[in-house]
Image (tube, grey):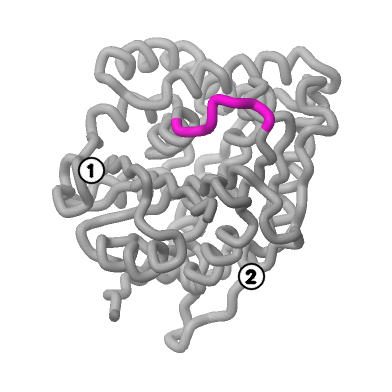
Amino acid sequence: MGAPVVSYRPAKVRELRVARVQRSGVRKSRRLTRALRGALLAPAYWLLALFAGAPGLSIQLMAASLGVRLLLGPGGRGQSKRAFRLIFAPLDSVRYFELQTIWKWLPSNHGYRYLDISSPRLFPILLVDKGRSPRAVMVNPDMRDLAETNQFSALKTLSGRCLLTACLSEKPPFLPESFDVITSLSVIEHIPEDTTAVRALWGLLRPGGRLLLTVPCGPEELEEYIDQDVYGLLGPSAHGMWFWQRFYGPESLAHRIFTVTGSPLRMAVYGERTRGCLAENALEKWTDEDYPYWREPYLMATRFRYYDSLADMPGQGVVAMEFRKDSA
């Protein structure tokens, strides 16, 4: 099953952005103005998003609470930038939908053994912080990301409860059938051998265990390649570009994922109202140093919506899926 290829060059876009910023000169006063504007306008846009029916606003409130405690805790001054992002702009784009949906689908009991595969660190951290799981085993091959995640251990509610492991998703160093719940939010699409990764995760689930995934989607499968190895994990393809991500269509979901897991117990689809707005939003973030991330929830509510199926979408989006491993 072949897939069309789209080549992006985000490194070149970032070079243009850096050159522009160097010419203009970003002073402390400009950064302070930008921060104050976000602090003042973020609550207003949160309310607009609430009335517009945006997903993920409860997640944003939990993140804000975490940011305040991080700022007031030990070494809070050194955490001010991270705390500010948590308070006013914790998530990006369709992450609001992803985190809220998977949060709602998690088991109601609190004693399960939980593994997270490279999701945005905020999700497993909040899960442990709010007592939804006694601890989280967190896998990520990106050492920089793990180092930043480790800084949250300064919070008493997280100390010793987030176990960080650096490894590839395809080769997790755990015994078979070790976990009751596994989450992976917008990760599988970045792995060329995605079926191998899903099979490895499926083998780590105990009978009756649940796998919760989100991946980008569209009416048809699409692969993207870029001109740099973002995570330093892949070799270039035959055409000199690096694999970046895959947008799954109905056929590729069935072929690449469902052959391992079987059909999902449930799915939720969230996508563009107008074709192309997701790519336009990504380009704006790459090129605009002052991009207002605090506006994201409202943009998601006005530019995206829920769909009954992938076939109903005019363009791209994200699909959340829950699978249960047969106890037999």
Q: Is residue 20 visible?
A: no
Count neighbours of disc 2 (C-alpha within 10 A) and say few if under 14, some if 14 to 19, many if 20 or more.
few
Q: Main secondary structure of the magenta part?
A: loop
Say what amino acid the circle numbered 2 marks.
Leu
Residue 258: % across, % down:
38, 62
Is 66 part of what is drawn in magenta? no
Q: Say which residue label 2 marks.
A: 233
Give the residue type that dot 1 points to. Glu
Mark 1 lies on residue: 272
Q: Residue at x 62, y 46 (%)?
A: 116
At x 66% / y 32%, what residue is drawn? Answer: 125
Task: Please name whichever residue, 32 or 242, is drawn nearer the observer in this view of the structure.
Answer: 242
Q: Nearer the viewer, residue 145 or 219?
A: 219
- State the extent of the magenta-drawn residues as a range: 105-111
Precedes in sequence: disc 2 or disc 1: 2
Q: Which mark is residue 134?
A: none
Q: Look at the image and tell me in which quarter the N terminus lies.
A: bottom left
Seen in the picture, residue 196 relative to 32 is either above or below; the reply is below
For mark 1, give the secondary structure: strand
